[in-house]
Amino acid sequence: MKKLIDGYRNGIGSLWGQIERAPKPRGIKRIKDGSDYQSVSRAKISQVLFPGDIEVLLETSSSIMIVPSLSIGSVPFSSLELPHSKRILSDITSVTVLPSLYDTNLSVPMYGSDDIEALVIGNPKFSDDPDWVLPQLPGAEKEARLISEMFNSTLLVGAEATKDNIISRIETAKIIYFATHGVASAINPLDESFLAVSGTNKRQARLTAREIQNMNLDAELVVLSACQTGLGGTEDAGIVGLARAFKIAGAKQVVVSLWNVDDSVTAELMLEFMNKFIGNGFDAAQSLRLSMNKIKELYPSPAYWAPFVVINGKGFISSN
């Protein structure tokens, strides 16, 4: 199953990434990368995950919650096609990934967007990393500035987006938003999975999953608008990496990506998401579904509209 999932997810990216004049991906090109992923039909995955009885239930569901094991958590469920009706899942229902069955008991704190303290990080000044090529992300900086205007925000961009500045502010923020490069490591998910920040050396310029999981967060929503932030090492309970690190640290909802994402289109998608998040009762899963469907009208390839997923836990923000 893992081979099918990896092939489908990476196959989506390869289809558009090889197009001449394709937009520069936000994903990071590994200097020593020689992988050649096989593209697999999503129909094969759908047939395994959505047998007849499950498909019937999905057709009438407005939202679904998935508790994955092993690599199932890296499936882009919203892009899957039901085996018989051929309907795309995002056209029918919102999808939320839960770390465990214990996370299905959702509390509902009440906020208005003007009262929410947000920490927004965008396009840090990247150093020369020994392992990764880190191009600057002008679309991410514009995205971060626009997102910061929606809340009572602290904005850190460019050289200000250092690890020290982030750590000193992150534990009091209700919304945490990163628009930067992200790396997922299956070999060493805690120390080699990281968000790229501003710094002059490897230690300063990487906010690792291990550092994140040792924080004490009070965040209702964390958005990782970066590449492959939903991936990492695989264990029985699912994917271990940046998303799991934020959950361990205390974040209620985490929005992450499953493959390398396009800089400018991602900015469009996430701005749409945050606007809908505020306007639709602060429901992250439903807001993401509506945003994906709108972007899908402009960019039909799942590479553009389907990389993000909501990982939920105990609680989400709701408006009055």
Image (tube, grey):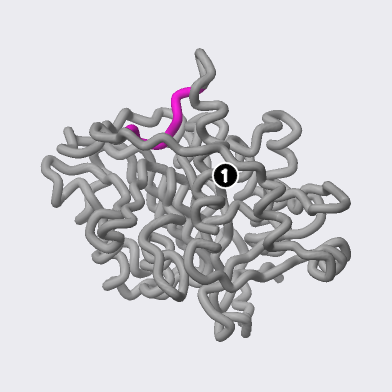
Residue underneath mark 1: 8
Residue that lies at the very extreme toward the top in this rendered image: 20
**Is 99 placed above or below 10 here?**
below
Residue 24, magenta (yes or no): yes
The x, y position of residue 313, in whole percent, is 54, 75
Name which quarter of the figure residue 215 lies in.
bottom left
Residue at point 29%, 45% (across, down): 196
Work out whether residue 106 or residue 220 is closer to the camera in this orientation and state it. 106
Q: Nearer the viewer, residue 154 or 162?
A: 162
Q: Is residue 131 magenta?
A: no
Q: Quadrant of the N terminus?
A: bottom right
Residue bounds of the magenta highlight: 23-29
Query: Which residue occupies 36% across, 73% down?
Result: 249
The image quarter containing residue 55 is: bottom right
Characterize the magenta stretch by its predominant secondary structure: loop
Across and down, in percent, residue 307 comes to: 56, 45
Looking at the rendered image, the quarter that the C terminus falls into is: bottom right
Side of 55 relative to 32 (left or right): right
Q: Answer left or right for 179 relative to 210.
A: right
Q: Residue furthest left?
A: 201
